[in-house]
Each structure stands twice: as C-alpha cells, then as structure tokens.
Amino acid sequence: MTGGRPRGNGPQGLPGISVTGRRAGTFCLLLVAALCAQATRVQVFRADGLDHNSANQRLTVERYAQPRGDILVGSERVTGSEPTGGRYAYKRDYTDGPAYAAVTGFASQAYGVSQLEGTEDDLLTGTDGRLTGWALWDAVSRRRNPGGDVYTTLNRAAQQAAVRGLGRQKGAVAAIEPATGRILALASTPSYDPGSFAGSAAADQAAWNRLQADPDQPMLNRALRQTYPPGSTFKVVTAAAALADGVVTDIGAPTAAPFPYVLPGTTTPLVNDTPACDRPGLSLDAAMTASCNSVLGYLGVRTGLDRMVAMAGNFGFGDARLDTPVRAARSNFDTAMDESQLALSSIGQFDTAATPLVMAMVAAGVANNGTVMRPQLVDRLTKDDGTTVRLMKPATYRQAMSPAVAAQVRTLMTDVVENGTGGNARIPGAVVGGKTGTAQHGVDNSGTPYAWFIAWAAPAGSAAVPPVAVAVVVADSDATDVTGGALAAPVARAVMRAVLGG
C-alpha cells in the first residue's frame, strides 16, 4: 500500500520504535536515575551514619586490620600491637600497663578507647589527615596509612617513683616541670592492666566486668578525674592572694589575726591542730610553718571573696575545660559564700575541691616566678617513620602573681620543709619548698582524712626555675599516722629526687 504511515515507525518517523518501546525505555531511564539517586543518598549523605552504625562491623574490622601506632615514654614504647589470628587481626598490648594506665588509658576492641588512646585515636589508627601523602588517592582507594606515634612528656624515673611510692595505697601523683608545663609523672592507684580487656573474647569481657565491679575503682583516674578537699595545701593559694592584695606585706611581721578566731556570723572558733598556733598576731611565715587554720582563715576573709576566687582561678580552679589533652575534672572554689564559709574555704575545706593536677599547678606556679604554664602530657606526634606532624610548645596558662610575691611564697614553702610539718620532703643537696595538708571529710568528718603534700625542688645554689613541682594525695591508707607530712611527703620526695637525678 502507498500513502499510509509505514508499519513500525515512531511518531517522528523513526523506524523500529513503537509507542510501547518508547515508554519502556523511558521507564528504564527513570529506574536508572532512581538507582543513581538512591546510591548517592546512601553513599554520600548517609555514609557517615552507616559507617558508624553499631550493626556495621566493617569499620571495626578495618580499625584492627593493622598494628596501632604506639605511645612512648622517652624513646621506649609502652604500648604495642599483638596479632590475634582472628577476624580482628590485631589487638592492643601494654608494657607495664598498670604503671602507665592513668596516661595511656585503654584501647579495647569491645569497650572503645580512653585517655591518650582516645584523644589521639585518629593518629594512632592512621586515619588522621596529617598522616596522608596523597589525600585524594587515599580517599578513593580507601587506603589506611600506618598509625602514628605519640611521644609523651613523662619522665620514666619519676613515673616509676610515683607508682612505687603510692604502692598499695589509694591515691594519686601529678608532677610538672614548672617552666614548661610538661607533665613528668601522672599516677593513680590502685591501677589496672588495660591489656586484660583489649580483645573481644569472653576472657576480655570477664576482666572488664571484674574491674567495673571492683569497689576500689581501679579504672578511676584519680590524678585527673577525681577531686578532693585539698586541706592545708590550699593555704599556699591563700597566702599568695593575701600577699598579692597587700593584706600582708611582710611575711615575718605580726598579722592582725586574733586568737581565738571566731568564724564571722557564728559563735564557732576556727580551731588549730597544734598549740603553736594558739596565740594572736602570728606572722604569715610562722602560721604557714605550723599550718595555722585561724591565721589563714582570717587572712582569706580579709583578702575578700572576689580576690580569693581570682587567685584560685589563676591556678586552674573553676576551669571545666582544662585539657592535657586528656580533660581534667573541674576543681572547685565557690564563687558565692558568706564570710564564715570563705574562712573555711581559705584553708581548703567547706566546698573547696581540687584534682592533684591543679594542686601541682599551684606548686609549679610558685616555683616559676608566678607564671602558671598550661599542663601538657604530649611532647610530639609523629608518623610511623618518625616524621613530626605536630610539636607541642609551652604555653602560659595564667600569670598568677608577680615574681616578687612568688619569691615570698617560695620562702614560706621552704620554711615549711626546713622548720615545719614538711620535714619528710627534705632532699640532701637540694632546696625543697612544700606544704602539707590533712583534709577532713565525710559526715561529721568521720572519714579517713586525705593526706596531701605539694612541693617543688631545685638543686642547691641553682638560680634557675626549679625543674619539678609535684602534688601527692593519699586518699586511703592503713597507716596509723594519716597526715600529709607522714604519708604524702615521702612520695613527693621520691618523685622529686628522681627528676633531680638523686
């Protein structure tokens, strides 16, 4: 036939495309577009959520597919990676794990990461962008770089001295290099072995459960994450505030402190622990040497709440973001108190509470001519080949007081060691300044007191900034003489001797 539309031609006269075929093709194109849109949504917009979904084990398998980078003390590695032969190819292991647990924390296939293992996790696992050579290629190929290493600021001898000194007692040590803020020792007892639950087997779960149920809380980092009433060690802060404000101008001159000193607005006298304090007009030097509550409580009230709060803040009290890079718990000095409460707070009681780290910062600030340096636990971060990707530099935290005031406070602390309650911290051939503290707590002060000692030490005759400052707290002990001078001062002495090389 002629004159008609050829059979099988489409509407535009194209051969071979029927209306049905065109519709089917359009439908297939729509399906392809929908699939592309879905793939884009899943792979781009939902990728992060799916990657971190608890049901997705791919990332966990990848995470343990290669050895983890290490944490080092000096040139020695205190961590390692152990092949498992299982689905997770490697698990973490630790050299002398309990001695360094307060620093390293743990890296567990089942229970995650903590402490430096947590704050530096990206570097240690090889996912940190600073480890990447060709970022785009690594992203496309999903190539994982070898884990980097974390070099700590710890002094091995000081750390071992801290752990040995605390022994089986419940307590903590924090030691700092005053001029730089480098943390030289950070110990917490009782401790735990982070390698005991690094895997995901039944034995790891059993070890974790035992630690969680332990009433002594071995996994609590008492050096960074626990606060205690600092007791008379806080008198160093009060003395600094009184001198900086001009309430006291001469540490050897009589003060106007009465005896007895009745807490303002009450009929309750602020009692002392020794008859040497029971007379009016004691000098600040005599009051610090004998640790007189009545004098320092009086001076705290005379200095005033605002200035006491400011001085405490200069040393880290009230800072909820004090990172080392591991975050420390917030130390407390109340910002709203009546005068009787201020008097008690000025001798480290009432609601005053501090971490050992912050009390080490107090001693370090005094030693460093009044400048408090930001505490830091990491010296440098490197690639696996040793190339540095970040080098930490000293940073000032606060100028707490003038060098002249700091010199007066150092004299006070030296007299405490030479002539007062801190005699157990003396080191032959060194100048040591310190302050004892025995902090009451519990209902009606019925708990075993916390025994504190803060100190700094320098070689005799040296004009340089003392190389070490330390804070020690013994929170529970079987000793009969539970005082800072008896329990904490010997531990501080051992740590300082280790740094001085004695």
Image (cartoon, rainbow, N blue to C red):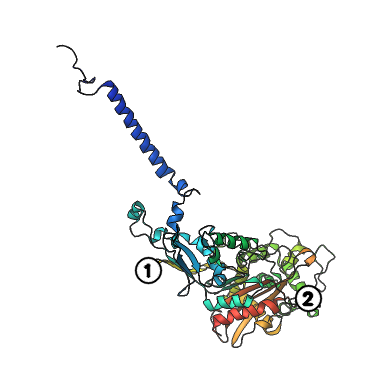
In this rendering, position of residue 68 left or right of residue 23: right
Quarter of the figure that contains the C terminus: bottom right
Rendered location of residue 73, percent (x, y) = 49, 73
In this rendering, position of residue 281 left or right of residue 138: right
Dot 1 or dot 2: first in sequence order is: 2
Q: To which residue does mark 2 refer?
A: 273
Secondary-structure class at tag 2: loop
Work out which residue is located at the far bottom of the displayed protein and give it.
Answer: 429
Circle on res. 330: none
Quarter of the figure that contains the N terminus: top left
The crowd level at tag 2 (other Cα within 10 Å; few <14, some 14-19, many 20+) is few
Rendered location of residue 302, percent (x, y) = 73, 68
- Amino acid type shown at disc 1: Asp
Q: Is residue 45 above or below residue 231?
A: above
Q: Is residue 110 above or below residue 45?
A: below
Circle on res. 385: 1
Secondary-structure class at tag 1: loop
- Amino acid type shown at disc 2: Asp
Q: Nearer the viewer, residue 466 or 489?
A: 489
In this rendering, position of residue 79 left or right of residue 171: left
Give me the residue at 46% from left, 51% from top.
57
* Location of residue 105 (image quadrant): bottom right
Give me the residue at 33% from left, 57% from top.
134
Q: Nearer the viewer, residue 194 or 126?
A: 194
Give me the residue at 64% from left, 76% from top.
409
